[in-house]
Amino acid sequence: MANGDRQQESLEILKLINAASTSLRLYPVDSSQVRNSTEDAYQSVKSFLRKYGRLHFSYQDRIGKLAGVSVDKTIQERLKLLTIHDQLQKIGLTEFILSRGFDRKTFRKIVSVFSVTPEQVKKAGGSRRFIAQLGLNDVFPEKEIAPGQTKEKLDKKQKTGQILKALAGTVVRPEDLHYLFGKKEGKALRLTITAKFKTAESAARLIATATYSFLQILQKNNTITVAPVFGKMLERLVSLIEEAGSVEQEECARKAAVLLAPSLDDSLAVILLCQQFPYPFGPLFYESVIENMGSDSLNRVCTQMKIQHEKMESSPSTATLQQKVIANGYGFFMSTPRARQILSAIMAREFLVKTEEIGTV
């Protein structure tokens, strides 16, 4: 019932904003009609926000939402009577969110959006550019930004989704990942997944998508640990590859790394390199990943891990579990030919810097 009351009050606020935008279309900007209707709407919106903190109206797939919840048929019909309802659709906007902190000048800009013509929007370069020019991206976001969520977090979430979609292609389904992580079983499911290991290309997509998904889950915990589920997944891959009997483990590892490595930022790479890579597939995959990572990226990752390694060595009794995990990961990484190559390059640069400093004395 409380949510129904809030939706009804939201509708009343939208009516006042609608009246203000209608006045703006019918009368001069400096007319009393525009001033009065805009001020009435402004004061009512402020009162609403003091009570609820947020006004949210969205319209997607022909369904209107108020306060983040789909409206009933009665409110839907009332929304359709508002010109701002049609206006959002005409200029290609789906979200309208008001939070505390705006002044009258900003509110007038907001009202003006509901009276602009599609031609004006097109002339500005489209709805997103038009909104950006007014400085109203937070009021008319492309997608809802939930309370407590920043635009940066939303952008990262969207980027992660795009990467997962690109890695999966048309091959990987959510249930495939659940099976690889041991969350779902079934003979029919295993047969379906085994068939995807008939080619190295489809196997690589499964491996890369599963690994990236796993890293995202660990990253959300804001701590670096060794997760047994990853090692078990790599062991499960071996049985699937052998059961399919069509491709070599080395080819699957190499092609999966080619897909995965460009998508790894520094933090994800550190998490990955700290995991356990059980024989026989694990070492092949590990070597392939670091071979396909760019030198600059691997250099930064190596430096981050080295710092934690040195902290643990300087004071092992007070070292955190995370520092120990990273130190172990660093030790394993430094045993690889690729790491020695990176270390040689670092030492060469440091030598050149020292040489230049001596030359300038």
Image: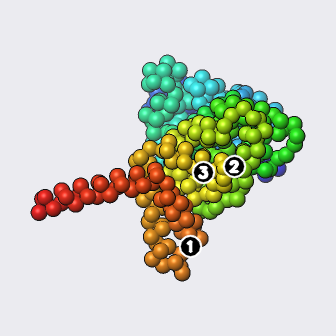
Front-most of residues 68 and 80: 68
Quadrant of the frame with the C terminus: bottom left
Determine whether, in the image, residue 249 is placed left or right of residue 5.
Answer: left
Tag 1 residue: 320
Residue drawn at point x = 60 percent, y = 55 percent: 219
Task: For label 1, count other residues whose C-alpha is less than 10 Å away and answer few (under 14), some (14-19) or many (20+).
Answer: few
Amino acid type shown at disc 1: Thr
Q: Give yes or no for contact between labels 2 and 3 (Cβ–Cβ under 8 Å).
A: no
The numbered dot on residue 234 is 2
Instruction: Tell whether label 1 touches label 3 (CB within 8 Å).
Output: no
Tag 3 or tag 2, which sits nearer the N-term? Answer: 2
Can residue 147 be seen here? no
Sequence-wise, the earlier of marks 3 and 1 is 3
Q: Residue furthest left?
A: 361
* Horizontal and vertical percent position of residue 254: 58, 39
Amino acid type, label 3: Pro
Position of residue 20 relative to residue 340, above or below, is above
- Which numbered disc flags the more N-terminal residue, 2 or 1? 2
Q: Which residue does the image show at 44% across and 48% down from the upper left?
A: 297
**Colour convention of the picture:** rainbow
Q: Residue at x 45, y 57 (%)?
A: 302
- The kind of residue on which mark 2 rests is Leu
Label placed on residue 283: 3
Q: Is residue 183 left or right of residue 172?
A: right
| Tag nearer the camera, 2 or 1 | 2
Distance Cα–Cα, label 2 vs label 3: 10 Å
Identify the element where label 2 is drawn: helix
